[in-house]
Amino acid sequence: MLFFPLAIKRKQYLNNSNIALNNNIKLIDPIGYLEFMYLLKKADYVATDSGTVVEEACILNVPSIQMRYSTERPEVYDVKASVKFDPTKSS
């Protein structure tokens, strides 16, 4: 199951669009830090654009994919806890 927290406006936009989501993607309202840490600890992996989430995932031994150009946390790559994915590059 993929949990995807979205702000209310973005969730409404997505729900009103014609984008079909896979059944294993669950859109949820924004969550607090403790709820987030619980989900992160139970996760098989995390995909994020946040440097902080990548660092927290590394500490919890949860593999991550960082979807951005660069990071302020390069040590996660040094210990092979995360991989970088540039969302602007086509494969």
Image (cartoon, rainbow, N blue to C red):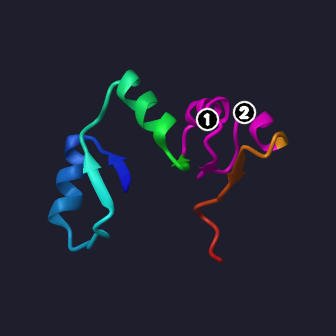
The kind of residue on which mark 2 rests is Arg
Q: In which image quadrant can residue 77 be found? A: top right
Is label 1 in a helix, a strand or a loop? helix
Residue that numbered label 1 is attached to = 51
Query: What number of labels is visible?
Result: 2
Write the start and end of the magenta stretch as one range. Answer: 49-77
Q: Which badge, 2 or 1, is on the more N-terminal residue?
A: 1
Q: Is residue 79 left or right of residue 45?
A: right
The quarter of the rendered structure image containing the C terminus is: bottom right
- Percent across and percent down for residue 22 are 32, 70
| Crowd tier of the residue under label 2, counting other residues whose Cα lies within 10 Å: few below 14, some 14–19, many 20 or above | few
Left or right relative to 17: residue 87: right
Relative vertical location of residue 29 with respect to residue 37 in this rendering, above or below: below
Give the image location of residue 10, x and y in percent: 26, 49
Amino acid of disc 1: Gly
Residue at 61% from the left image edge and 32% from the top image edge:
60
Residue sitting at x 20%, y 42%: 8
Judged from the image, the secondary structure of the residue bearing numbered disc 2 is: loop
The outermost residue toward the bottom is 91
Label annotation for residue 73: 2
Where's residue 53, x and y in %?
55, 34
